Amino acid sequence: MRLKITIFVLFIPFLLKANEQLKPSWIDLPSSTYLCHMDFSPPVKEKLSLDLDLYHSKDKCSIESIQERVDCLALILHDIDRWSEVELNPSDFAGFTLLKKIVCSKKAYLSQIQEIYENDHNQELEKYHRDISSAIHPDHPALILRNERIYSLKMQGFWGDFWWESLDPCHRRLSSYLELWEKLCEQNPTTPPFFLWLENQHVPNSFPQVTYLEEEELPPYHFIISDGLIRHSVTSIPLDCEPYTRNIYVISLDEKLYISPPIEGIWHSSFSKGKPVLAAGVISVENGILRVLSIESGHYFPSFENGYQSITLLLKMGICFDETFQICFYENKKKYSVDVSSADLAGYPLFHRALTDETRRVLLSTCEF
């Protein structure tokens, strides 16, 4: 049985559980005029209209008003729960279920925004993203989440503000909005704080987000090495990646190997919630045998040294490098590959020499960023 089938089965209960969990959302409540389209009873519709009008009357740009908005949402939830017990018509349930989900998610979002501005988030960000307290061997250099904005020709936009991405309750890729907000701040010092300013911007519901995985969501992605092969930690079945797919890997500070096939929202920062990792890249495995290891991660930007650290950690876990495999890497916005053998892995100088040998390099693509 190929692992791609098994791993899909393993993902199902975890994904269903994740969907049941309340997650913050920036999507705001509808105005009271929307209720004319809902089949609610007149008393319910009248009270809900008053609740929504009160909520939308609060200043979205004021830090002081966040608690007032949270209180309004709590009032709406209280009324929804009360109505659901005694006054709802059967036709009301579907609409109220959707409305309650929006209210709960928005309340969770605003509560986290309030916490951000009640604390010194700049100092907390620095501490959070440099925390290596869970490292088994602190002498292994850790990769820190990047916090540098660059413009990508390939993506046709700004990206790289990953500390803001982890600060955001919804973990959105906000570089384009940050760029605009910073320009507005230069022009007008009274521009509201970023997340409050963002409340009045159009951010589509489909806006790209990074999924930060909870501890209980990690097992489907956890792999071990046994008998020299990369195997799933639960089934022990050798990993067999789909050809030509981008399978990302991370080695955490506690030296656990996580691998994910292409899944929307899953990026290198997903496994550590944006905290440091020991290694990050892209991997291709055939029947448990490593075929390609690519030193690449937009979130962590690993170097040659970190690529070699990936290999030494895999060796420590017990991987077998009896066969030649391919190392891919970036240099000057170009992507190269080099075939390496165990002889090139005897030390970093030999590894570096192999990657920088012009006669061994194969140019794969240009203008990657």
Image: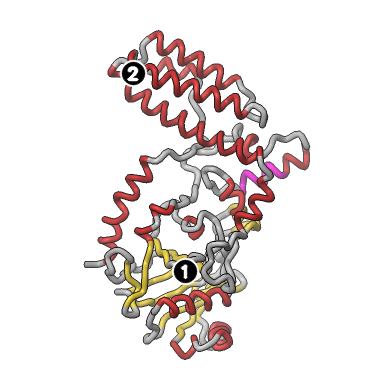
Quadrant of the drawing holding the C terminus: bottom right
Give above or below for 257 relative to 77. below
Image disc number at residue 23: none
Q: Nearer the viewer, residue 23 or 244?
A: 23
Mark 2, other Cα within 10 Å: few <14 / some 14–19 / many ≥20: few
Q: Residue furthest top?
A: 43
Quadrant of the drawing holding the N terminus: bottom left
Q: Amino acid at mark 1?
A: Glu
Q: Which stretch is magenta? A: 175-182
Is residue 10 visible to us here?
Answer: yes
**According to the image, label 2 marks what residue?**
85
- Give x and y (percent) for residue 352: 57, 84
Q: Amino acid at mark 2?
A: Glu
Give above or below for 338 relative to 3. below
Is residue 334 visible to us here?
Answer: no
- Give x and y (percent) for residue 118: 66, 38
Image disc number at residue 255: 1
Name the residue located 47 percent from the left edge and 28 percent from the top edge.
Answer: 103
- Whether the magenta-drawn stretch holds residue 177 is answered as yes
Q: Residue furthest left?
A: 1
Q: CA distance from mark 1 to mark 2?
A: 50 Å
Give above or below for 367 relative to 263. below
Figure disc tally: 2
Name the residue located 61 percent from the left edge and 49 percent from the top edge.
Answer: 164
Name the residue located 40 percent from the left edge and 84 percent from the top edge.
Answer: 321
Q: Main secondary structure of the magenta part?
A: helix
Mark 1: which secondary structure?
loop
Mark 1, other Cα within 10 Å: few <14 / some 14–19 / many ≥20: some
Q: Nearer the viewer, residue 324 or 332?
A: 324
Question: Quick one: label 1 or label 2, which is nearer the N terminus?
Answer: 2
Name the side, left or right, on which 321 lies relative to 1.
Answer: right
